Amino acid sequence: MPRFEPHPPVRPALIAGASSGIGAATAVALAELGHPVALGARRVELCEELAGKIRA
């Protein structure tokens, strides 16, 4: 018996470069679809702003 569901409908996503551009757009799009997202970026302030927008 598998420990986890083999093909869950919602999967967590790790987004690198999430402070701007494609990374930010991808994070927002996946969050809107209901996927939990973990954001990573060198510009922490912008990443925190994006995280706040996603949570709202």
Image (tube, rainbow, N blue to C red):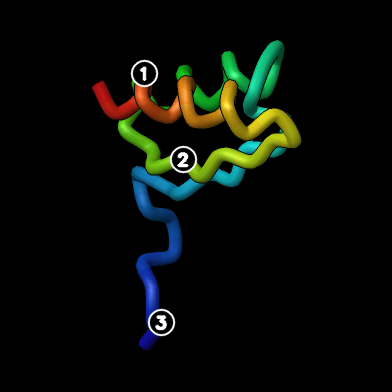
Outermost residue, left direction?
Answer: 56
Q: Amino acid at mark 1?
A: Lys
- Within 10 angstroms of label 3, few (less than 14), some, or many (20 or more) residues? few
Instruction: Please report the residue visible at 43 percent of the width from the left and 48 percent of the height from the top.
Output: 11
Q: Earlier in the sequence, mark 1 or mark 2?
A: 2
Q: Earlier in the sequence, mark 3 or mark 1?
A: 3
Q: Is residue 9 left or right of residue 37?
A: left
**Residue 27, horizontal then vertical, whole percent:** 53, 26
Vertical order, 15 against 1 (above or below): above
- Mark 1 to mark 2 CA distance (whole Å): 13 Å
**Residue 40, horizontal then vertical, whole percent:** 64, 41
Q: Earlier in the sequence, mark 3 or mark 2?
A: 3
The residue tagged 1 is 53
Q: Amino acid at mark 2?
A: Val
**Residue 34, horizontal then vertical, whole percent:** 31, 32
Q: Quadrant of the C terminus?
A: top left
Vertical order, 44 against 53 (above or below): below
Instruction: Please report the residue visible at 46 percent of the width from the left and 40 percent of the height from the top.
Output: 37
Q: In which image quadrant can residue 31 be found?
A: top left
- Mark 3 to mark 2 CA distance (whole Å): 24 Å
Q: On residue 33, which mark appears?
A: none
Q: On residue 37, which mark appears?
A: 2
Instruction: Please report the residue visible at 70 percent of the width from the left and 15 percent of the height from the top.
Output: 22
Would you say the residues marked 3 and 1 are in contact, meaning their CB atoms lie under 8 Å apart?
A: no
The residue closer to the viewer here, 37 or 34, is 37
Secondary structure under the numbered disc 3 in the rendered image: loop
Q: Amino acid at mark 3?
A: Pro
- Within 10 angstroms of label 1, few (less than 14), some, or many (20 or more) residues? few
The residue tagged 3 is 2
**Given this view, does label 1 or label 2 mark the residue nearer the observer?**
1
